[in-house]
């Protein structure tokens, strides 16, 4: 019964374009946290990757730049006619969500874009044995 309440709330929220944008921003937030966590795990526990704070900082700066673009894009939707601005924002956020999911999948080794997902298995092994990469 509790799940019905959640689904009813999400359906009411998704009934308006503002609600859809709110849902998308929430998905982006969760996906970014998951992507950064998996990236850190991959760098920390993958024996083939040298863990450098500069590379991590570069990734954080890139994500911050994307958030700045989102923050600038949202108010710009009112400068163009509503029939164009809000759907364009929804399309932009949808593309960003797909980009984040691609990055998450690549950290897990499910896509072929140069990231090695074997570190996730190394992470699980390290956790069960109580150590980090050597």
Image: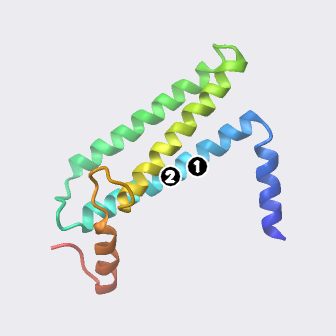
Residue beneath the point at 55% across and 32% down: 92
- Tell which of 77 and 103 is nearer to you: 103
Residue for badge 2: 31
Residue 105: percent from left, percent from top: 42, 56
Residue for badge 1: 27
Quarter in which the N terminus is drawn:
bottom right
Residue beneath the point at 43% across and 49% down: 102
Vertical arrangement, residue 88 with respect to residue 63, above or below: above
Query: In the shown orientation, is residue 10 left or right of residue 124?
Result: right
Vertical arrangement, residue 12 with respect to residue 39, above or below: above
Quarter where residue 19 is shown: top right
Quarter where residue 127 is shown: bottom left
Residue beneath the point at 28% across and 55% down: 115
Residue beneath the point at 57% across and 39% down: 94
Q: Secondary structure at mark 2?
A: helix
Quarter in which the C terminus is drawn:
bottom left
């Amino acid at each position: 019964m509790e799940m019905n309440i959640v689904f009813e709330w999400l359906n009411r929220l998704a009934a308006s374009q503002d609600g859809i944008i709110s849902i998308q921003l929430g998905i982006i937030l969760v996906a970014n946290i998951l992507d950064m966590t998996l990236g850190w795990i991959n760098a920390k526990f993958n024996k083939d990757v040298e863990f450098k704070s500069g590379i991590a900082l570069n990734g954080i700066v890139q994500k911050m730049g994307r958030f700045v673009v989102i923050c600038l894009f949202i108010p710009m939707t009112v400068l163009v006619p509503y029939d164009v601005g809000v759907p364009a924002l929804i399309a932009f956020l949808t593309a960003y969500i797909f980009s984040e999911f691609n990055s998450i999948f690549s950290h897990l080794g499910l896509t072929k874009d140069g990231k090695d997902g074997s570190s996730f298995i190394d992470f699980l092994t390290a956790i069960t044995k109580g150590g980090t990469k050597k």
